[in-house]
Image: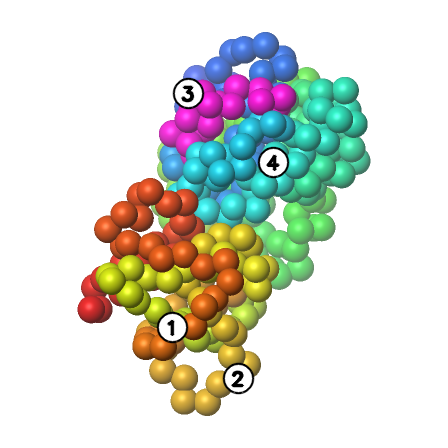
Amino acid sequence: MKELIITNKILNWYDIHKRTLPWRKKTSLKKKQYYTLVSEFMLQQTQVVTVIPYFNRFIKNIPDLETLANFENRKLIKLWEGLGYYSRVRNLKKAAKIVIKDFNKKLPENFLDLKSLPGIGDYTASAILAIAFNKPFIPLDGNVERVLKRYLYLKKENQIQKNNLIESKKILGTSIRSSDYAQALMELGAIICKPKKPLCQKCPISKNCKSLAKQDFVLKKIKKDSKDKYFLLKIYKKNNKYLLVKNRNFNFLKNFNIFPMEELIRPKNFNQNLNFKMSNMNMNIKIKNNKVIKPIPFSYWIDPKKLKNHTLPTFTKKIFTYLENHK
Ligand code: SF4
């Protein structure tokens, strides 16, 4: 009964306050499934506001699964350029190919088949089933987790572990409007139960919220260790152009053009020039200028004034900016 009250309150709030988002617009069932797939891949590591223009451009160029399965890789990467985490778009295309070949061109409607597709884990499978197929799943994204942790005042390490959160989310109940309900919960976390300053006076479930009652909105996180890694980045310069190589050595940014670099294991006296956070890696980078130019396979000379003509990861662009600022 308690669950039903929460569910109705959140859905009523959503009906009035939901944002207009391009992947939410009314369309055919087939398109809705495709839009959900694309948007969920884009939203895996990126915020809604950033995703909107990318989504619109992507759908304009690649309107359906069949087109995606056959779309030229170079153009595909270009459409994704700036969103980062490029493995997402590669997996998206691979998933489209499998759906066309093995699932009769229809996105599978069950958890295990969806999870068998590249780039789809528990969360994305639940989100697709709820949003695109109206199945009673509640995907536990960062927004929903925050609402849950605050509503129930979950502070202890064991309470906020994934398995226990899955148990706790039963308090949220389910609805026959599963698609709307999943989106309503995400929306509530995104625009009301915000990470820094929750807008409790506008929240439909404020009456029984324990964090509000205690006036303590601080969220506890499970500590994840990010690994320190050390890299020597080699700069080759000729006629104001820099040498880049196609990355075949590292698992991150695979096949992208990066500056030649090597990983150093526990280096001594390492004076870093740059630091990057990438996935769960803390990259410490030392730059070394090289005068002798040796032939390097799969390498290219690139003019820093013409970066727009190339598809480059943000990582490489930031290094270009650093070099240009430290001439
Ligand atoms: S009342 Fe405030 S803290 Fe509680 S769920 Fe709503 S927005 Fe979040």
- Mark 3: few, some, or many residues within 10 Å (few <14, many ≥20)? few
Bounds of the magenta segment? 51-67
Q: Mark 1 points at which residue?
A: 293
Q: What element carries label 4?
A: helix
From the top left corner, tell me how far across and down residue 15 is, in percent. Answer: 48, 17
Q: Residue at x 46, y 47 (%)?
A: 84
Label 2 near ligand 1 (CB < 8 Å) = no
Which numbered disc flags the more N-terminal residue, 4 or 2? 4
Residue at the limit of the structure toward the front, as seen here: 295
Mark 2 or 3: the one toward you:
2
Which of these two is toward me, 73 or 284?
73
Q: In the rendered view of the protein, which quadrant contains the N terminus?
A: top right
Res 92 label: 4
Find the distance from the CA under tag 1 to the CA under tag 2: 27 Å
Which numbered disc flags the more N-terminal residue, 1 or 4? 4
Q: What residue type is labelled 3?
A: Thr
Q: Which amino acid does label 4 sit on?
A: Leu
